Amino acid sequence: MQELLEGDKDCFLVEVKVKPTNNFKIFLDADSGISIARCVSFNRALYKKIEEAGWFPEGDFSLEVSSPGLDEPLKMWRQYRKNIGRNVEVTLQDTTKIAGKLLEVTEDGIVVEETKGKNKKKEVIAHSLLFENIKQTKIQVVF
């Protein structure tokens, strides 16, 4: 898989899930966003490599290539970087939740700006959070 991604520096592997039924789910992302067409292209190329390698002579495997989707937590530093400016919900290891705008991503962690209250009671708090203290971070969709 890595050799297929080497020609596309913008795209990166997020996760691979393999089920005992020979079902492979490959999750890709890209700094500029990943389209369905790119996923289809990677799927075809990877499918061809698996067939050529003869891993499943009976052809009893399935392959899905997609983006992680908004409901999946961020797993990689590059995902955090590409989502600067978006609203996130961060769950810390102690189960505390912080919701706000992702302002900054460093090597060690992130800065999330949380707004509490309204009008005169409005309070803006910048939380500096270390990755080691983060259990999960999810993008929040705003309508």
Image: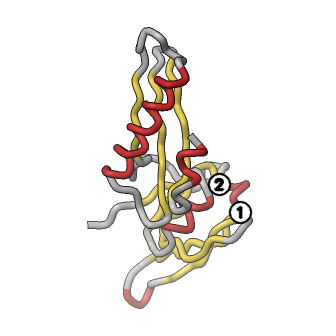
Residue 133 picture quarter: bottom right
Where is residue 23 drawn, in percent x and y? 45, 23
From this viewpoint, which residue is outermost toward the top? 58
- The residue that appears at 47% across and 77% down in the rendered structure is 115
Q: What residue do we see at 50% from left, 67% from top?
A: 82
- Check disc 1 and report the residue beneath it: 130
Q: Position of residue 103 (x, y in %)?
A: 55, 76
Q: Quadrant of residue 92?
A: bottom right
Which is more toward the observer, 52 or 25? 52
Amino acid at the residue labelled 1: Leu
In front of the other: 82 or 102? 82
Q: Residue at x 55, y 41 (%)?
A: 15
Secondary structure beneath dot 1 equals: strand
At x 31%, y 66%, the residue is 142
* Residue projecting furthest to the left: 143
Answer whether labels 2 and 1 touch (C-beta < 8 Å).
yes
- In the picture shown, does residue 71 fall above or below 55? below
Which residue is at the far front? 52
Which residue is nearer to you in this view: 72 or 47? 47
Q: Label 2, label 1: how many angstroms apart (C-alpha)?
A: 7 Å
Looking at the image, residue 96 lies above or below residue 87: above
Residue type, numbered disc 2: Ile
Q: Which mark is residue 134?
A: 2
How many numbered marks are there? Answer: 2
